[in-house]
Image (cartoon, grey):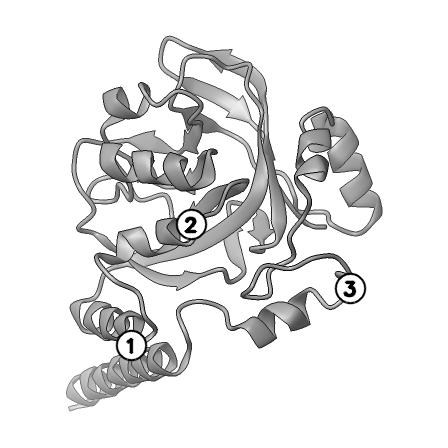
């Protein structure tokens, strides 16, 4: 009897969690609203994009190309940003001398549940998004952006872009990506001159194991909390071009 009651209680708790998740997903916009962006960046006094995002000047991005990682880390640490470093990435190109700098456009993926996945797709279409959900953050990229996505390190069934979406990313942003997850079509991505991608791994499968849940909201990449309006900067410390594994650095910080 006690075992049966315990099973019922556990089942009800799980159902309650599912209902709460579904209600939260339905109530929250997938993309951070303009008023929230303004609240998160209240100290910004410069130009903004139409959706409220701070428009960090290209001249600042160009200057950041010359800043050493230790200099950036030290400045951030002094200002209280103590979790702004993440390492151990694989990269899409054999040239390990490049530096990736840009305004972070964030996205978050979670393990897929059919009920929540369907709800979020319907919610996104109501907000005006079109096509598959993997393309929604890419549609929002502008020159100077870096697409930063948390897909919880998923590999098998986890690649969130391949050759076609990689081409779209570079067409819109003229930049690259930082993914806490995997990608596919490495041979095609390597042919996109100027594209830089830093990911956890590569896999030939397609994205059937995760779902997009938010865009432009605070996102975790390893030990770093990233906002849409942050810089993303990466450069190599050491590289092994035989297996494409290197020790890189990722920073997110509010301008």
Q: Residue at point 55% right, 14% down?
A: 97
- Looking at the image, which residue sits at the far right? 78
> SS of the residue at dot 1?
helix
Task: Identify residue for label 2.
Answer: 150
Question: Residue 117 sits in which quadrant?
Answer: bottom left
Dot label at residue 235? none
Foreground residue, 103 or 55? 55
For mark 3, does the 10 Å Cα neighbourhood hold few (<14), some (14 to 19), or many (20 or more) residues? Answer: few
Q: Indicate the quadrant containing the N terminus: top left, top right, bottom left or bottom right.
A: bottom left
> SS of the residue at dot 3?
loop
Q: Residue at point 54% right, 66% down?
A: 51
Q: Residue at point 75% right, 35% down?
A: 72
> SS of the residue at dot 2?
strand
Q: Residue 151, percent across and down?
A: 36, 49
Using the rendered image of the protein, determine whether residue 69 is visible from the camera's viewpoint. Answer: yes
Task: Identify residue for label 1.
Answer: 126
Task: Identify residue for label 3.
Answer: 43
């Amino acid at each position: 009897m006690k075992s049966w009651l315990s099973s019922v209680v556990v089942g009800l708790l799980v159902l309650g969690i599912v209902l709460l998740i579904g209600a939260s997903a339905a109530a929250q916009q997938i993309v951070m609203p303009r008023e929230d962006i303004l609240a998160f960046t209240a100290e910004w006094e410069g130009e903004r994009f139409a959706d409220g995002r701070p428009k960090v000047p290209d001249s600042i991005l160009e200057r950041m190309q010359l800043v050493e990682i230790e200099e950036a880390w030290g400045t951030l640490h002094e200002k209280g940003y103590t979790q702004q470093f993440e390492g151990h990435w694989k990269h899409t190109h054999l040239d390990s001398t490049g530096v990736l700098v840009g305004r972070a456009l964030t996205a978050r993926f979670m393990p897929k549940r059919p009920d929540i996945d369907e709800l979020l797709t319907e919610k996104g279409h109501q907000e005006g998004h079109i096509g598959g959900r993997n393309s929604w953050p890419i549609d929002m990229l502008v020159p100077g952006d870096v697409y930063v996505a948390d897909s919880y390190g998923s590999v098998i069934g986890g690649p969130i872009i391949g050759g076609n979406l990689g081409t779209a990313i570079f067409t819109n942003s003229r930049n690259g990506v930082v993914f806490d997850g995997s990608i596919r079509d490495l041979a095609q991505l390597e042919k996109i001159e100027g594209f830089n991608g830093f990911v956890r791994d590569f896999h030939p499968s397609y994205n059937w194991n995760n779902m997009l849940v938010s865009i432009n909201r605070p996102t975790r990449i390893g030990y770093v909390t990233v906002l849409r309006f942050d810089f993303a900067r990466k450069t190599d410390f050491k590289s092994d071009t035989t297996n494409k594994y290197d020790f890189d650095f990722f920073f997110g910080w509010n301008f």
